[in-house]
Amino acid sequence: MTHDKGFEIANHIYKFGNGFFITFDNGVTVSVQFCYFHYCYNHNTINSYTSNKEHPAYGSPCECENAEVAIINKDGGFITKEYRDVGDDVLGYITPEELVDVMIWCKNYGK
């Protein structure tokens, strides 16, 4: 997955946007997702549901106080572990303040 520089709403997975992508000049993309199947506080609301379509809030825009974040290089590969290795390609439960640090790291990647 590669993106042009700028912003993109992430509405490819669910009916409404569940996050966004930001791509920097260096080709690094930050994926910020916060709907029911992402590692954020919303994730804990689906314990008894097998799919998003069964969730009572399906079709409603998601909001959350934290988010799942992935860092993707210009070739579409995950580089999240270069930022922080948590044993997964995504970082969960990232606060807005932590997201700023991720963005700065991504903007400066490769410099």
Image (spheres, rainbow, N blue to C red):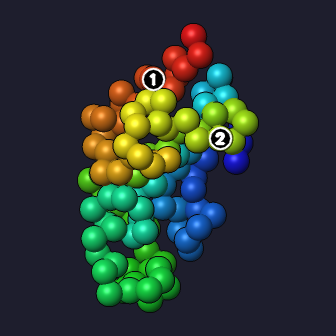
Q: Which label was assigned to residue 77?
A: 2
Q: Secondary structure at mark 1?
A: helix
Asked if residue 25 lies left or right of residue 103, the reply is right
- Residue found 41% across the figure and 62% down from its top: 38
| Front in this rendered view, residue 110 or 66 | 110
* Rendered residue at 48%/83% (across/down): 51
Counting from the top left corner in percent of width and height, residue 11 is at: 59, 62
Q: Residue furthest front?
A: 87
- SS of the residue at dot 2? loop
The reply, left or right, for residue 53 in relation to residue 12 is: left
- Asked if residue 23 shows in the view, the reply is no
Provide residue 94's location: percent of width, then percent of height. Answer: 32, 45
In the rendered view, tell whether residue 37 sits above or below residue 5: below
Give above or below for 108 relative to 21: above
Q: Which residue is mark 1?
A: 105
Q: Quadrant of residue 36?
A: bottom left
